[in-house]
Image: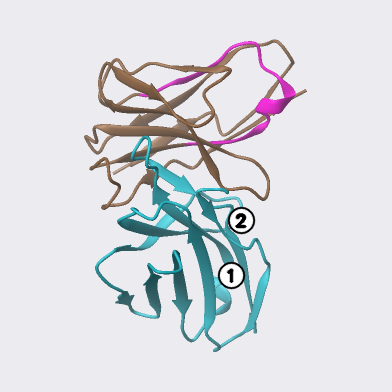
């Protein structure tokens, strides 16, 4: 099982550029999440989805957009990149919404905006 | 007050000692609590979760809840250098139901 796959692993963007971070899971989980982690900080929830076609904002959604057209994929779109979006981005999925079975995290995307 | 708070550390313990990591939470109605371990440069992995009805032991790891003081602890017995990592506490948000993470405590186990 691949679990949660994130691409790319590293990316450098210039200010004002846009990009899409890809996330795919093969565990048939309905719940998927995007978190960002700044150095020395915990994870902040950006967006989440409870199923195909349903998305909702987390703690820090500004500057990001998501879509969920299939159960497997949950891409995160950055429009007009800013230095404040320099971070490590983790995608995760879970069997239940309460997370009692744990969130499975992808390996992360390290993004630098210069 | 942050919803989930942890001392960032580092917490340094000698090999074989007990490491005690604490996490405070603000929502008195919280019912479940999670501990994740994150090695440097890696993604978090779930190592323990407990419900509000009691403590839990799993091998060398014990999670304890103090509801009156609103904190949850993770005890690691017989600490090993391989336990050196950042430990993240997480609690479901009262708004979204999704996990809110503390900033993590870095544990260093010295041989």
- Chain part drawn in magenta: A74-90
Chain B tint in image: cyan
Please rate how many residues cluster around mark 2, counting C-alpha atoms within 10 Å: few if below 14, some from 14 to 19, many from 20. Answer: few
Above or below residue A80? Residue B71 is below
In the picture, the disc for residue A95 is none
In reply to whether residue A73 is colored magenta, the answer given is no
First reached walking from the N terminus: tag 2 or tag 1? 2
Viewer-closest of A18 and B51? B51
Q: Chain of mark 2?
A: B
Determine the residue positioned at 38% across, 36% down: B95
Pinpoint residue B59: horizontal percent, then vertical percent.
34, 79
Give the residue furthest to the bottom. Answer: B16
Pinpoint residue A90: horizontal percent, then vertical percent.
49, 37
Is residue B36 left or right of A9 when viewed as pictured? left
Q: Quadrant of residue B35?
A: bottom left
Q: Quadrant of residue A12?
A: top right
The CA span between labels 2 and 1 is 9 Å
Q: Quadrant of the C terminus of chain A?
A: top right
Above or below residue A80? Residue B3 is below
Pinpoint residue B82: horizontal percent, then vertical percent.
54, 73
Pinpoint residue B76: horizontal percent, then vertical percent.
47, 78
Q: Chain of mark 1?
A: B
Q: Tell me the residue that label 2 is attached to.
A: B40
SS of the residue under disc 1: loop
Q: Quadrant of residue B85?
A: bottom right
Chain A tint in image: brown
SS of the residue under disc 2: loop
Above or below residue A66? Residue B39 is below
Is residue A72 left or right of A105 when viewed as pictured? left
Q: Tell me the residue that label 1 is attached to.
A: B84
Q: Quadrant of the N terminus of chain A?
A: top left
Q: Are marks 2 and 1 in contact (CB under 8 Å)?
A: no
């Amino acid at each position: 099982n691949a679990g949660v796959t994130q691409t790319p692993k590293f990316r450098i963007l210039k200010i004002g550029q846009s990009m899409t971070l890809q996330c795919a899971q093969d565990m048939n989980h309905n719940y998927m999440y995007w978190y960002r982690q700044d150095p020395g900080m915990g994870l902040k929830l950006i967006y989440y989805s409870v199923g195909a076609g349903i998305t909702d904002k987390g703690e820090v959604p500004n500057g990001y957009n998501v879509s969920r057209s299939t159960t497997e994929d949950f891409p995160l779109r950055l429009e007009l990149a800013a230095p404040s979006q320099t971070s490590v981005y983790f995608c995760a999925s879970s069997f239940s919404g309460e997370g009692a079975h744990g969130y499975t995290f992808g390996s992360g995307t390290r993004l630098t905006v210069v | 007050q942050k919803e989930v708070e942890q001392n960032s550390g580092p917490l340094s313990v000698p090999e074989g000692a007990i490491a005690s990591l604490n996490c405070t939470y603000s929502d008195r109605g919280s019912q479940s609590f999670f501990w994740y371990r994150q090695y440097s440069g890696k993604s978090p992995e779930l190592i323990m979760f407990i419900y509000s009805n009691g403590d839990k032991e799993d091998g060398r790891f014990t999670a304890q809840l103090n509801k009156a003081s609103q904190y949850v602890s993770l005890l690691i017995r017989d600490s090993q250098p391989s336990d050196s990592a950042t430990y993240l506490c997480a609690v479901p948000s009262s708004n979204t139901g999704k996990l809110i993470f503390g900033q993590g405590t870095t544990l260093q186990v010295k041989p």
